Each structure stands twice: as C-alpha cells, then as structure tokens.
Image (tube, rainbow, N blue to C red):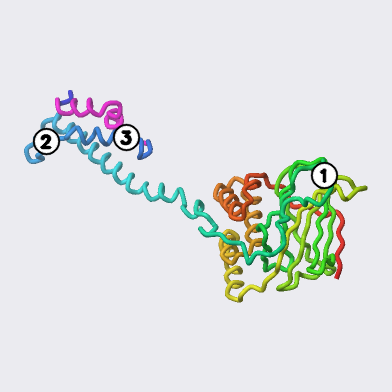
Amino acid sequence: MRSTQETTVLQKLGADRNILLKGETPGKKVQTNFSFLSRLVEVKIPQLKLWGVSTENSSSMTWMKRYSQITTLAVSLTLGLVLNVPSQAQAQPSSLSRSLLPNNLNFKPPERGNPDNREQGATRKPISCTQTLTALTPTKSVGLTVAEYPTFSWYMPATSARSAQFVLEDASEREVYKANFAIAGKPGIYSLDLPASANLPPLAPDKEYHWEVSVICDAKDREKDSVVWGAIKRIAPAPAFANKIQRASLRERVGLYAQARLWHETLATLLELRRLSPNDSTLASDWKKLLLSVELDKVASEPLVQSAASRTSTSSN
C-alpha cells in the first residue's frame, strides 16, 4: 500500500508516472521531457531525514526507492539537455547561409563612349522569331577578365529559331572566333566557353574585344537576326591575387573575383555553382544580387540553361 506522499507525487506527475513505477528511463527526446521535468519540480518532494526513517517500515523503504528513481531521472534529463544543446547548435552552420559576395558591388570601369548595346540591336529588320535578347555584361562598360579563354553569357527568350551564332572580334573588327550552335528555343540564361585550342590564341592582355550573339531567324536573310553584343578586356592579375585564387575554394573565389571587379569570372563561377547546386538559396540570392548590381533585374529570375555547345566553329590567327 502506497503512502499518502507517494500517491500525491504520482498523481501530480500524471501520465509519466508509469515510467517511475516500472523503473524505466524515458526514451523521449529532451525537448519533449521539459513538461515532465517541470511537473517533477512542482511536486516539491520533501527532504527525507534518512536517520529518522525506520528500516523496518516497508512503506518508508518503498518511498525511498521511488524517491531515488525520481532523483536519478531528474539528473538524467538535465544531463541529456546539456549534452544535446551543442549538437542542435551545430545543425545549422552559418557559413552556408552567408552571402558569397561583398556588400558593395562595382563592375563599372570608366565608361566608354559607345552606346549600350547589351540588348538586341535596333539596326536590324523587325524580327518575329524571338523577343529581346540580353547580354549579361555591365551596361555601357567593358567586362573585365583575367582568363585567357573566358566564358560569355546572355539571356535568350523563347524563340522558334533553332540555330544561333557567336562571334568574337578584336578592336580592329577582325574576326577572331566564330561558332554556330543549335538551340532548343527554350528561354533562359545561356553561356559559351571560349575553347582553348591550338587554332585559337588566348585573349591578349590589355586588349579590348567585341563579342556578339545572333539568333538566326531566317538563314536566307541574316538581316532578320536578333543580335546582342558586348565588350571584354583581359587584364593581368597581380601575383598576390593569383595566389589567393589558387588557394581559395570555388565558393570563396566568387567574393575575390567580385572585389577585383572581374565581371566574367564572378558571373561564370557563380553560374557554375548554381548549376552544381540548383537548390542552394544562398547562391540564388547572390545571383540576383549580382545581376541587380549591373541593372539586369529583368532577367535576374530567369532559369539557367545548359552551356551552348558549338556545332561548327572557325577561328582566325
């Protein structure tokens, strides 16, 4: 028969009393045992004067055993809480949610005298196979790079055309590289890597180049092409910067390139990361931040398309 004190304790503990009566340790997570621990404290278990309890009294001995179980359980729950907090804190690493880009982005070298032609040219005939193309390049300025064979990117809306063309020219309008490639007509962000080959020399340092992309609406009348173009200039990196890039991870390079105002490397690296991790919210946010910094907000939410694969290409030395 239980004592009055024991009965009162078990009533206040409610459903969790079965754990104590069976002498078991709760298998619930620490978080779900907070209410149980709170009720345990509210019971206000009296302090037993062990020297005043007779060992011949079976009721007193039973109560002592129950009290020992309650104390052990309370200590176990407390230790579990202390040990569990660090693991919860480590479950959400802050480094993955931190922006890869610096707060202030500036990809605008001294402005050039040429008009902004990163949206489809107005000198062509009216076209019907597509809407406005957009080159992903800073407005009214040249995009900087340190790459010998850089990556070029643009936005293409839905089109009925099935072929396009990329052309790279030097400052004297001499054709350096040309490639025709098939397109599926899907809207999105496209890119093309300038191929490193024996027939194509690397971009010369401190030289400006002109590049353009044409969507071929009518192969028999190229005046109907939808065309966008931009400018690019290769600069020589400082030795200290080159060493930093070699030691940095792909994610770290995004910020280093942006700080150095290297538009083509910043865009291409972030584009590669997004294609590798399409569900990464930090990369998606940084992508929009980068495009907004050069007033490309119209295409900041457009989907990414695979890199353009050249079907035929020619180069001139």
Number of the front mark, 3 or 1: 1
Q: Which residues are magenta?
A: 4-27
Q: Residue at x 27, y 26 (%)?
A: 14
Q: Which of 140/181 is in front? A: 140
Does the residue at mark 2 contact the one at mark 1 (Cβ under 8 Å)? no
Figure disc tally: 3
Position of the C terminus, as image quadrant, is bottom right
189 in magenta: no
Residue 283 at what x, y percent from top left?
58, 51
Q: Which residue is mark 1?
A: 126
Q: Amino acid at mark 1?
A: Pro
Q: Residue at x 78, y 66 (%)?
A: 196
The outermost residue toward the top is: 1
Q: Amino acid at mark 2?
A: Thr
Q: Earlier in the sequence, mark 3 or mark 1?
A: 3
Residue 192 at what x, y percent from top left?
75, 56
Q: Which residue is mark 2?
A: 55
Q: Which of 187/7 is in front? A: 187
Is disc 2 surrounded by few (<14), some (14 to 19) or many (20+) residues within 10 Å? few
SS for tag 3?
A: loop
Q: Earlier in the sequence, mark 3 or mark 2?
A: 3
Mark 3 to mark 1 CA distance (whole Å):
82 Å
Number of the front mark, 3 or 2: 3
Q: What kind of secondary structure does the magenta stretch mostly adopt?
A: helix
Q: Which residue is mark 3?
A: 24
The quarter holding residue 128 reads top right
The outermost residue toward the bottom is: 239
The quarter holding residue 293 reads bottom right
Residue 19 at what x, y percent from top left?
30, 31
SS for tag 2?
A: loop
Visible residue check, residue 188: yes
Q: Earlier in the sequence, mark 2 or mark 1?
A: 2
